[in-house]
Image: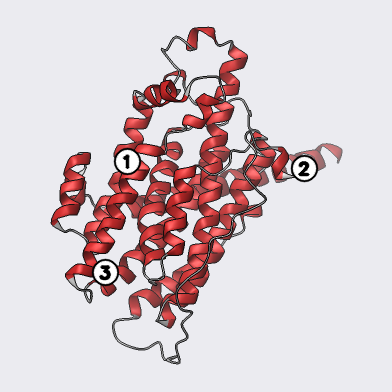
Amino acid sequence: MSTHELYVNPPSGPGREIPASGDARFSWEYDMADAGRERLLALYQKGKDKQWDGARRIDWDLEVDPYDPLGTPDEALALYGTRHWAKLTEKDKGELRRHYASWNFSQFLHGEQGAMVCAARIVESAPDLDAKFYSATQTMDEARHAEIYGRFLHEKVGMLYPINDDLQTLLDDTLRDSRWDMPYLGMQVLIEGLALAAFGMIRDTTDKPLPKQILAYVMQDEARHVAFGRMALRDHYRQLTDAELREREEFVIEGCYLMRDRLRGVEVLENFGVPRKEAEEFSERSEFLHLFRKLLFSRIVPCVKDIGLWGERLQKAYLDMGVFDLGDSNLDLLMTQDEEIAERLDAERFAEEERQRVAEVTAAIADGAAEE
């Protein structure tokens, strides 16, 4: 079935073209033994070692109820407690859960395609070969993530949403900029930070094994991507002038306000007949949205501070958003936890498979003994 047949609201066209700018850079320095480059090369090695196959590592045989794909409680739905909620039948509530899951995972899918394009752009434009090497592994990671989210939506939910206009704006701004570091900043710091917050919130609250697997394994990869962006940008931003740093801080400020104020799933409520202004009010009152925003900045703010973008105007913006204190969060600890959760899921699954094999062998031996 064509993906276009599954869209709730048809996209404006078959795809989107964003004019590219900036230079494609070649490096003739192939000696990777240069002191100070070991960190990126170690991350590149880890990127190679940690490649995996989404068709095999994820248990696609797990059943998913399309009308409750994530086990979402009533209280987490923006319509809960409003005058519209009482009018919904149980079937309507199931359809609402389906739409919200579709909207969330559709934005994940579109974002991962954007991340794949940005990673490919970094391969093209980064001046250093070690950064190109690592970005090549990230491009493969992002392709795998898009494959997985697309499969989940096609096979398990059966519904997609077009890319959110404001997420598209942020991607467009990131890709149109000719400066080679901007795909790092827009994607690795802002969009990946947004994605990790959303992934982590669902991963840690859902009781459904398939989406939990998908999100945990994707987040394991994303932990490496954020580490790469931090290393590359921290080194580069030490060399920039105050004016150049201010330009990048302005980009971060605009991106943070955009993500905080616009990515709310209002499109879902509009599809249920709720006027846009009212849908925005319901979304703003949602405890789920408030928690998501807090988690969103727990990933972005410490990363921004770590790479050296911490000017007065940026600090003032974070004070206005009420997230300034998150600059002291332990980002390394969060990333370590992301990797450990995926490893635990693997260990649990392998242990269960081993128990099943032992049971099969034991049953076969018992059957053989009974026949003698």
Q: Secondary structure at mark 1?
A: helix
The residue under the point 58% across, 39% down is: 210
Quadrant housing residue 364: top right
Residue 117 in view (yes/no): yes
The 10 Å Cα crowd at callout 3, few under 14, some 14 to 19, many 20 or more, is: some
Circle number at residue 234: 3
Sequence-earlier tag: 1 or 3: 3
- Residue 58 is at least partly visible in this image: no
Which circle marks residue 1 in the picture?
A: 2
| Amino acid beneath label 2 | Met
Q: Tell me: residue 164, above or below residue 36.
A: above
Mark positioned earlier in the residue sequence (2 or 3):
2
Q: Residue at x 15, y 48 (%)?
A: 316
Question: How many angstroms separate mark 2 from mark 3 (CA)?
Answer: 45 Å
Q: Quadrant of residue 32?
A: bottom left
Residue at point 48% right, 12% down?
A: 85
Please, what is the three-letter code of the amino acid marked with disc 3? Answer: Arg
Figure label count: 3
Nearer to the camera, 56 or 225: 225
Query: In which image quadrant can residue 332 be found?
Result: bottom left
Q: Amino acid at mark 1?
A: Leu
Label 1 sits on residue: 295
**Residue 188 position within the rendered picture, expressed as x and y whole percent measured from the top left:** 39, 59
Secondary structure of residue under mark 2:
loop
Residue 238 point in image, percent of width and height: 21, 73
